[in-house]
Amino acid sequence: MTGNVGSAGVKEGAASVEYRAGYSSDSDSSSKNDRFEMRQHVDYGVNDWYAVRLITAQNKSKGDNLELKDFKISNRFQFFDRNEEGWDGGIRLIYTHADGDKKPGSVELRGMAQIPFAEKWEYRHNLMWSHDVGEDSTSGLELQLRHRITYSFEGVSDVMKIIKVGADMINNFGRLKELNGYSNQEHVAGPMVYSAFENGAYIQAGYRRGLSKKAANNLVKFDLGYKF
């Protein structure tokens, strides 16, 4: 719900903090209806090709209290740089430790591409494989595809550095050994906007509509961050 189409970019010494929040409604699923999630990130570029990110996430279902969901360690590696190859590319290796007894964690490998074109346009693509680990885990690889396309407005004002408007799409196919039709997978898409300010702050907001029966009908999300 709070996930984005990630970037492969890494810069030595670059640090940021971020807060994300998401809300979903669904008339057909009690688990997705009136559900709230939030995450907190701390990100640091160790050098020009490796960055580490620590993430905590909380979840609140309808009628329940807000509870800790999981903790993640994300390792980002950049292998291609747009200043040399014309595009940014790399991978993320992510370990998730779920809160609570008998809840499986997961390991994830994410391939990422960030491709500028036609001067002010940019296309992002993420290919993600994950697998449960630990107690009560289920065997089988899970697959996700994520896409984002944006158009940039630069030098908007003395305060605002850039605005990006566009759309993203997230496709969660589930476990590959259990693929059983589009309606039983989670596919969502919708508009988004990103704004970065001269002081280092940035915001991103978006709306996603469920495209398949299993996906939540409506999702809204908001990110607020600061780059040092």
Image: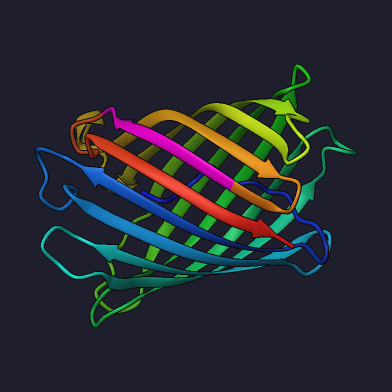
For the point 80% across and 57% down, the residue is 11
Q: Where is residue 112 drawn, in percent x and y?
A: 62, 44
* Residue at x 24%, y 83% (from the top left corner): 101
Q: What residue span does the magenta drawing correspond to?
A: 203-211
> In front: 15, or 107?
15
Which quadrant does the C terminus fall into? bottom right
Establish if 47 lies above or below 198: below
Q: Which of the 4 quarters of the picture holds residue 140?
A: bottom left
Give yes or no for residue 189 being in the magenta stretch.
no
Q: Is 221 positioned to the left or the right of 28 in the image?
A: right
Residue in view at x 24 percent, y 63 percent: 60
The residue lying furthest to the bottom in this view is: 101
Q: Between residues 52 and 200, which one lies in front from this camera angle?
A: 200
Query: Which percent across, then down, holds residue 47?
Result: 82, 66
Number of marks drawn: 0
Q: In this view, does 221 lie above or below 149?
A: below
Nearer-the-camera pick, 59 or 184: 59
User: Residue 184: x and y, percent?
Assistant: 20, 37
**Position of residue 95 measured from the top left corner of the image (x, y, whole percent):** 49, 69
In the figure, is residue 28 to the left or right of 209?
Answer: left
What's the colour scheme? Answer: rainbow
Residue at the (26%, 40%) spot, across then down: 179
Instruction: Tell which residue pokes out farthest to the right in this image.
Output: 84
